[in-house]
Image: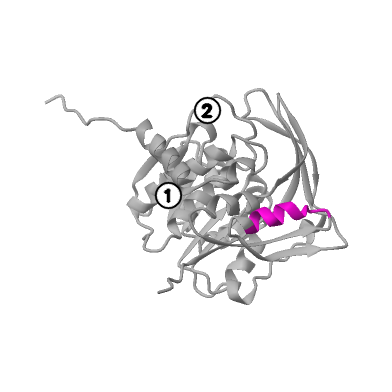
Amino acid sequence: MTVNKPHLVVVGSVAIDWIITPRAERPESVGGSATFFSMAASYLSQVRLVGVVGRDFPDYAVADLRANGVDVSGLEIVQDGLTFRWKGQYHENMNDRTTLETHLNVFEKFQPRLPAEFRGSEYLFLANIQPRLQSDVFAQMQRPRLVGLDTMNLWISIANDDLKAVLKNVDVLTLNDEEARQLSGEHNIVKAARAVRALGPRNVVIKRGEYGALLFDADGEMFSAPALPLEDVVDPTGAGDSFAGGFMGWLARPGVEPNGASLRTAMIYGSVMASFCVEGFSYDRLKGLDAATIQRRFETFASLTNFDRASLT
């Protein structure tokens, strides 16, 4: 008997990056929020990608996505334009980076249009694009079971009203700690998360880089997921998007209910996929994984905070 698996749609950027780190440089590094998300989530669920690229986007990258089972029929290729390009330099601590160049190219006029077969998908992740476009995509969906969204400081600054409008339709919001403070006006991260949840998202995930991530769920509970201490971080680009891919990928699996327990498990799978991502340039480390390798990394995460409960009485 064939089991119909639920589908996870992601809408976001597909890009070519020029990455400079303290120890290496790669001028042509395939990136973009939808790319990293799709590669990470593909090991956990059925992914459908919506994005736009130009004639310069490499064929091998499309083949890699297909090889991981990603449905790329929603990837628009504009033959008379160039792909979104970003150039950035990471500093010695690999946490801070400087944007050197940004060329939106075909991404500047991106108007996401979901293929008809995508619109009935049960799960949707709105990666980091303009909030107005995120609302447009949500309106094209029929009745998604779970909606996730990522945003950034730019949209909080220049499109605050549009962002707050789309947040009313969101089940899970992912953002970093600085963005949570900016959006909420609260410096304390617990107060910030509470204020952000009041804007509409039932669950808020605050990404904290090398310090892990925090979940503030719909029941008012808090959970802290660690980051894996690594000896060698090659390229942090896409770590947050890979986290989101692992997180949403787990929740989109058949039989998984988006409750407190499964959200915590999703946090760890998100951290697992982010830890693989940073071990290589682009999505290099997200290729060729298997279930056993991912599960071993998951168990490593579990052991980081495994301890015996004790009592003073």
x and y, in percent, of residue 92 in the image: 66, 22
> What residue appears at the point 47 percent right and 67 percent down from the top-left corner?
6
User: Is residue 192 something one can see in this rendering?
Assistant: no
The disc placed on residue 64 is none
The disc placed on residue 230 is 2
Callout 1: SS: helix
Task: Verify whether residue 73 appears in magenta.
Answer: no
Q: Where the C terminus falls, by quadrant?
A: top left
Q: Is residue 212 left or right of residue 50?
A: left
Q: Main secondary structure of the magenta part?
A: helix
Q: Residue furthest front?
A: 1
Region in magenta? 56-66
Callout 2: SS: loop
Q: Amino acid at mark 1?
A: Ala
- Point out the frontmost of discs 2 and 1: 2
User: Is residue 260 something one can see in this rendering?
Assistant: yes
x and y, in percent, of residue 208 in the image: 52, 36
Report which residue position mark 1 lands on. 266
> What residue appears at the point 35 percent right and 33 percent down from the top-left corner?
303
Determine whether label 2 and label 1 are within 8 Å by CB: no
- Does label 2 or label 1 sit earlier along the sequence? 2
> What residue appears at the point 40 percent right and 47 percent down from the top-left corner?
216
Q: Amino acid at mark 2?
A: Leu
x and y, in percent, of residue 97 in the image: 69, 32
Label 1 neighbour load within 10 Å: few <14, some 14-19, many 20+: many
Q: Is residue 254 left or right of residue 109?
A: left
Residue in front for this viewpoint, 227 or 130? 227
> What residue appears at the point 38 percent right and 48 percent down from the top-left corner?
265
